[in-house]
Image: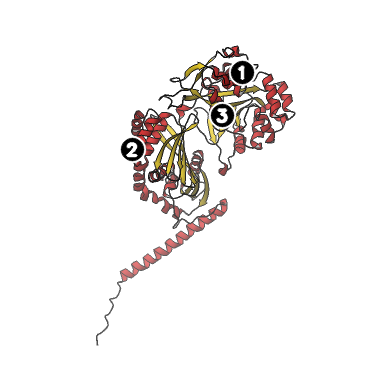
Amino acid sequence: MAQPLKQKPVPVEDKQKELAKALENKLSDIQLQKTEDEAKTMADKFGLPYINLVGYPVDVEALGLLTEAEARAGQLAVVARDGNNLTIALVNPENKTAKDILAKLAQRGFKYSLAISSSADMAKILNRYSETKATEKVQLGVIGISENELSTIQQSVESLSDLKERLRSVPVGKILEIILGGALKIGASDIHFENEEKSLRLRYRVDGVLADIADVPKAGYEKIITRVKLMSGLKINVHNKPQDGRFTIKHQSLDMEVRAAVTPSEFGENIVLRILDPRTIKQNLEDLGMEENTLKTVKELLAKTTGAIMTTGPTGSGKTTTLYAFIQHINNPGIKVITIEDPIEYHIKGITQTQADEHAGYTFASGLKTIIRQDPDVILVGEIRDGETAEIAMQAALTGHLVFSTLHTNNAAGAIPRLIDLGVKPVTIAPAINATMAQRLARKLCEKCKTKQKIKEEDLKKIADEMAGINFKDYGLNTPDASTELYYPSQCKECNSTGYKGRTGIYELFQIDTEMEKLIQTSPAISDIETLAIKKGMVTLLQNGYIKVLKGITSVEEILRVMN
């Protein structure tokens, strides 16, 4: 019978190694538990949730919002992202570097929620940076848009018809570059990708009006939306809810921010890209299109050191551009200007611009309170949306500050009842406001192809009915009659066959004097305010539009389109 094999005795040295290893593992487990307990204590101290990052599905794209050096210095990491909403794990909320990084993220427009993690877990997450570097290089190679490539595209695109031809002949992988390059060349403010049942509709917004560009095959669109999401820092695998992001195009030594909004629809996801080109912003008052008397009044108002100027109009009527022009006109080293905006659209040198962030508790109202404590001379409030903001803005205007802001009303007279509706007392509004102004943007006739002809009978009637009481000589014009000649739109390659190129502002403005103050204190109707303003010389939006028609700047049909 075979004898069982005898096991060789385990050497003493190996037993010691096994014991040492077991002890090391035990100590490691104790140390890990200790760091977790410390993290939970830290979480309780600051009233924040504790997050166990072991096995946590970290979003690699979100992680890349911070550099490895920043993350290690602050002992924090962005572990998840939903549009502009971030989930951030950190070891110690009192870490000064962490606080600075969080502040910078807020300035970039991000909102975040914090959670405490252990230092051991954080070390593992930070090691993910080295694991993802290769992936990042590949992604950057895919989504990067070359400045040289954009320049080449722009040289071959002179008009919308040229762009349509290019889009028919380029491979799918190059379509996005062509679309962006063409938009910059033509001066489009927005690019719309609209999913339809069998194809994708591509449109540009040029001078405030949408124009069809092309239909893109559905298969190609999947590649476009993936690249847009990558560039904008959005989740590629999320298709059933809206996402917002941004990316930057570096072109001709300029940084142009592009804001991306992705929205689910019946046939797939739609994209709108808004291009913020600093070259398109009119920063001088003289460039806005105001008549000489209006411009003179505005400059006198801007010379004051206290009171509010309210600018009104619908979305896209140029209100923000006007406020920026106000700031540029008065900005000098002797005054302090602070803004609160949502979002900051263009950056202006020499002033302090802040962005509202409701998630972080920095609303227009709370931000305005903070701004006042910073001893500013001039305050710009991007928009008055609620009663608290309105009340604080009016009080600031009464206490030695020059305040600029906007309201969504149809005309200048509507600003007063709107503030009353928000809860501001008429006795506060009357002395606080220096003037209210309404505006629209109208397309200008193309200088290359506009044609001169005898005024149409229906146009003469419209102008005559509206302009009763206007002294045309004040504007260097003759009273229009049947022999008057006007310019009308035509078509050419320069204006993409629209008849129009560029836009100008149309304005109405009235100042608050003693008589108007007394009327405001009665909580008047809009019509009563407008009647008194016109009596005191206010030129209405429609009248100002027709003045520009008679000067050959725009057309009757365009003014009627803008004024609905």
Instruction: Report the residue marked by disc 3.
Output: 319
Mark 2 to mark 3 CA distance (whole Å) = 39 Å
**Element marked by disc 3:** helix
User: Quadrant of residue 364 in the image?
Assistant: top right
Residue 409 is left or right of residue 87, and the answer is right
For label 2, the crowd category at 10 Å Cα-Cα, with few meaning under 14, some 14 to 19 and many 20 or more, is few
**Residue 458 at what x, y percent from top left?**
58, 21
**Residue 24 at what x, y percent from top left?**
39, 63
**Residue 463 at what x, y percent from top left?**
59, 19
Mark 3 to mark 1 CA distance (whole Å) = 29 Å
Q: In front: mark 3 or mark 1?
A: 1
Q: Which mark is residue 170?
A: 2
Type of residue at label 3? Answer: Lys
Residue 14 is left or right of residue 53, and the answer is left
Point out the tag, 2 or 3, that comes first from the N-terminus. Answer: 2
**Residue 444 at what x, y percent from top left?**
50, 23
Instruction: Report the residue marked by disc 1.
Output: 464
Q: In front: mark 2 or mark 1?
A: 1
Type of residue at label 1? Answer: Ala
**Element marked by disc 2:** loop
Residue 129, compared with residue 380, is above or below; it is below
Foreground residue among 409 and 478? 478
For label 1, the crowd category at 10 Å Cα-Cα, with few meaning under 14, some 14 to 19 and many 20 or more, is some
Q: Residue at x 67, y 29 (%)?
A: 416
Foreground residue among 336 and 85? 85
Residue 247, compared with residue 550, is above or below; it is below
Residue 455 is left or right of residue 77, and the answer is right
